[in-house]
Structure formats: structure tokens, C-alpha cells
Image (spheres, helix red, strand yellow):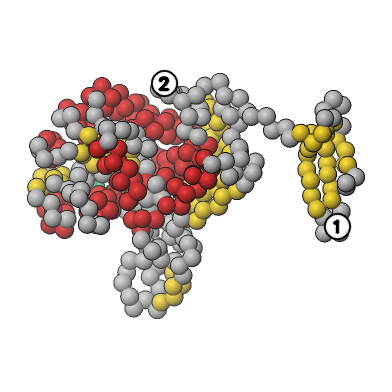
Amino acid sequence: MLGSGFIGRFYADSIQGYRSQDKIVSIYSRREESASKFAKDYNVPFYTIDMEAAIARPEVDMVCISLPNNLHEAAVMLCCKHKKAVIITKPLGRNAAEAARMVNAVEAAGIFNGYLEDLVYTPKFIKAQESVRNGALGRILWAKSRETHPGPHSEWFWDIEQAGGGCILDLGCHCIEITRSYIGKDILPVEVMCWADTQVKPIDAEDHAIGLVKYENGAIGQFEVSWTFRGGLDLRDEVMGTEGTIWINSFLRTGFDMFTTGNGGDYIAEKAESNTGWLFPVGDDLNELGYNHMFMDMFNAMEKNEKPKETFYDGYVVNSIIDACYRSMKSKLWEPVKLDIWRGKTGVSKDSHLVEYDKDHYLVKEEMTHYGAKKTIVKHKQTGKISEIESK
Ligand SMILES: NC(=O)c1ccc[n+]([C@@H]2O[C@H](COP(=O)([O-])OP(=O)(O)OC[C@H]3O[C@@H](n4cnc5c(N)ncnc54)[C@H](O)[C@@H]3O)[C@@H](O)[C@H]2O)c1
């Protein structure tokens, strides 16, 4: 494990927390006291402040990178040097150029690589995606994902140089991969329109943004992100298809409401801002955030010599979309997504949206009204005339 901070500990809880056979055998942290504390807390036999020494140990099968964004590339290069399987937290890089170098390096080294996008492994997401794949929603037209919270917990996130960006990079990376997964990861993201602003915090990066990602098949992905949202961690998805709709609320208001005067513990759920009054706890943070299913996929895939659901390549696609968002935020125009590496389909056109009514007409809309009349609106195939057909 590289990094003993916020996410390193979430990951460790998930990896070792359920009588798992997987064990953390080596921990690197920047400061010795953090490394030794982590080693003690998680029963890790070796700790160090030398990153390469942590990676190179012979008992290490896989390296998990849980470091600030500006250290991802150097850590990945060390994994390549020592030919260790590597899994990395999000975002892969601070930008697409860094991400591309990492993809090329792990593939040239021939090592297993996984991208730890936990939010496409939440139980609700897995079930929703299965329904989308089964056709329950028909053709996916629009997928929206929102992640807003009161801002990150460590100083480096707020420094644009170390973090690489603001809430678009930090939170938008989740939303973009979620919506991309609903629309189809083999569908080319073509262009992006993004609004972003620094509305509240004294920082150089954006603390609010909304973005639209247009896909080659006509579907639209939308993200909403904020580092200054008050009231906890708001994680929601909406998916709309020609045959159905999915709404998911992953963290706030999940059906678990509690009132307390504040006599219990301080921790309610990730980024909860209060521990008194009406609260919205989460049954099991690790599971609700997807960590358990994510590590299961990573370890199973490595054992079977297969690719996990999320690889470095996915991280690169996300970084490329985010780069386009930053360009659009400045230009205020639709900006093309530049993908030097693309492994999905190309030349996909919008599916036909025409529904046959009879040999001369396409169906526009059918509706039963409150006064008992059935309304049927059609369009004539040749003339294009819209008309209403008497109920049959
Ligand atoms: N849901 C998620 O997937 C999720 C959530 C939070 C963070 N993250 C990602 O995890 C990575 C680490 O974030 P975090 O929240 O754990 O950060 P953090 O500040 O809590 O921990 C970072 C750890 O990195 C180590 N470190 C080594 N050199 C360092 C340096 N120069 N400066 C600071 N720390 C250094 C330390 O062990 C430190 O504890 C980031 O890439 C972040 O985007 C992912």
C-alpha cells in the first residue's frame, strides 16, 4: 500500500476487514509516524518512508497506489520497473498526457493494471447497469451523475499544482466514468461543454462545475460537481432511456434516517457535516461506496489472468474528457475530446428513433386522458403532417 491517508485506510478496511485472505504486507507513507501507525492499525509487517523499498519487496504481489495526484505517475513508473501488478486510485493522472504515459508504461511492462473507480462497483450501480445491459431502459439517451460535498480533507487537494485541478478532476472523474458506463464504454465521447467557477473558496481551481459530454451515438452524459455543497456527500445518478428510467441515491437519504441529540459517536458517514439532529447514516460505507466489489474484481481478475472491469485505459479516457472540460470552461464553446488512444467503436450513428404506427404513419405519442379519451398522435411518412387519430 502506497499512502496511509484517507483513501489508503478506506481501502485497507475493505481489503482486510472481512476475514479476507488478502493482506497488506508493506506500507509506504511520507512520514514515519504515519507509516508505523498504519502498520500497527492494520497489522502490516513492514513499513517504510522509501517508496521504492515498499514496492520492491518480494512478498508484494500487487501495489495499491493511494497517493496524492501529483505522485501517481512516479509511483506507477516504479511498479513498472519492478514488474509489480498495480492498481491506482482516481484520477489516474492530473491530465491526459500523464495518464497516457502511465497506460503506455504499464502495457509496455506487461503488468496487470486496474483503475480504482469505486463508484461503478456500488451494489446499486452494478444492479442498475445490469438492467441497462438487459435492455430494461431501451436506448440510453441521457445519463446524469452528481457528486457534491463540502470539500476534501487534505491540503494538497486545494493546491492546483499538486491536485491538477479542482472539483471537475476530483469528483467529475467519478461522474464521467459512471455516465460513460451507462452509455457504453465502447461509445466514443466526441465533445464537451462545461461551465465551472470558483464561487466560494480562496483557491485557483474551480469549486463548482456542470458539464455535458456528447457521445457519438447521440447520447449525452451530464455531471454536476461541487466542493462547497452543504449537508454531506450527495451521490446521485439519473439514467433515461427510450423504455425506462433509473434514479439512484447512493449516500444521502438512502432510507436510513436517525435523530440524535449528539450523545453518540462523532462519525456518521463520509463527509456528514453534523452528528446531531436528523441524520442520514449509511449502513456500510465500504459496501455502499463500492470498495468491496471493486477489490474482489481486481483480485479475481489478476488471479484469472484477465482484465478487471476498470483499467488504466479507462482512467486515460476519463482524463481526456476532463481535459476537454477545462478547455471548454475557458473557451465557453463545445470542445472536442482528444483521444490518441481509442479502443472502442467508431462511426456509430444515432439509432433510428422512428416507431411504426401503420404503413403510412410513424407514432408520435399515445396517451389515455383523465376524461377517458385515448389520444394517438402520428406523423405521415411522406408528407410529414402531424395529426391525431380517432381512438379505435
Ligand atoms: N473515492 C475515491 O476513490 C477516493 C476518495 C478520496 C481520495 N481518493 C484519491 O486518493 C488519493 C489520495 O487521497 P487521500 O484522500 O487519501 O489523501 P490524504 O492526504 O488523506 O493521504 C495521502 C497520503 O499519501 C502519502 N504521501 C506521500 N507523499 C505525500 C506528499 N508529498 N503529500 C501528501 N501526502 C503524501 C501520505 O501517506 C498521506 O497519508 C488521491 O489521488 C485522491 O484523489 C480517492
Residue 372: assigned label:
1
Instruction: Please report the residue visible at 32 percent of the width from the left and 69 percent of the height from the top.
Output: 266
Q: What element carries label 2?
A: loop
Can residue 332 be seen?
no
Instruction: Please report the residue visible at 46 percent of the width from the left and 25 percent of the height from the top.
Output: 344
**In the image, 93: left or right of 240?**
left
Residue 370, picture quadrant: bottom right
Q: In which quarter of the image is the N terminus?
A: top left
**In the image, 350: left or right of 304?**
right
Residue 116 location in percent, x, y? 33, 42
Front-lying residue, 355 or 32:
355
Q: Is residue 81 above or below residue 149?
A: above
The Cα–Cα distance between marks 1 and 2, rounded to whole angstroms, is 57 Å
Residue 340: assigned label:
2
Front-lying residue, 313 or 6:
313
Q: Is residue 356 above or below residue 28?
A: above
Residue type, mark 1 in image = Gly
Q: Is mark 1 on a helix, strand or loop?
A: loop
Residue 177 location in percent, x, y? 44, 39
